[in-house]
Image: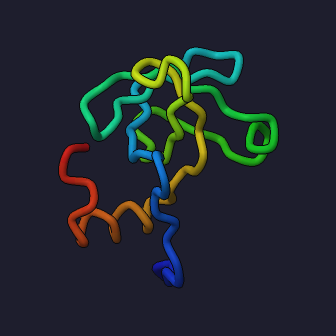
Amino acid sequence: MEQEIKRVKMPRGGELFGRVTNLLGSSRLQVECEDGKERLCRIPGKLRKRVWTRVNDIVIINPWETQSDSRGDLVWRYTRTEVDFLRRRGYLKNL
């Protein structure tokens, strides 16, 4: 029984797709972004207990205004069904 996808959240503004490469503890992740940069990302408090991330999860991150090439915040984590949809549509070519 496959999940039905009604609406998939897409990056807006300065947000980017990324893939989690390492879990660092203390609500921090190492994320490889679609622009080729590795960023240290944090999980904001409102997502900390609701979203459990693992290595190789596809996520949306929002780079910080300062240190935008090295830091960011996690915005969204995709389910496996949503990732399959994004790959079929060609959004995740670099990840």
Q: Residue at x 43, y 29 (%)?
A: 31
Q: Is residue 76 left or right of residue 34?
A: right
Q: In terms of image quadrants, where is residue 82?
A: bottom left
Image position, residue 79 (x, y; %): 51, 59
The number of discs equals: 0
| Residue 60 locus on image (x, y percent) | 49, 47
Q: Position of residue 32 (x, y in %)?
A: 35, 30
Residue in view at x 65 percent, y 41 percent: 52
- Farthest residue in the front direction? 65
Q: Residue at x 80, y 43 (%)?
A: 46
Vertical arrangement, residue 40 with respect to residue 34, above or below: above
For the C terminus, the quadrant is top left
Q: Nearer the viewer, residue 80 or 59?
A: 59
12, 4: nearer the viewer? 12
Image colouring: rainbow
Query: In the displayed structure, would residue 24 be above or below residue 54?
Result: above
Judged left or right of residue 32, residue 81 is right
Left or right: where 35 falls relative to 82: left
Vertical position of residue 9 compared to residue 53: above or below: below
Task: Give the image location of residue 51, x and y in percent.
Answer: 68, 46
- Looking at the image, residue 1 lies above or below residue 67: below
Q: Which residue appears at 50% of the width and 84% of the height?
A: 4
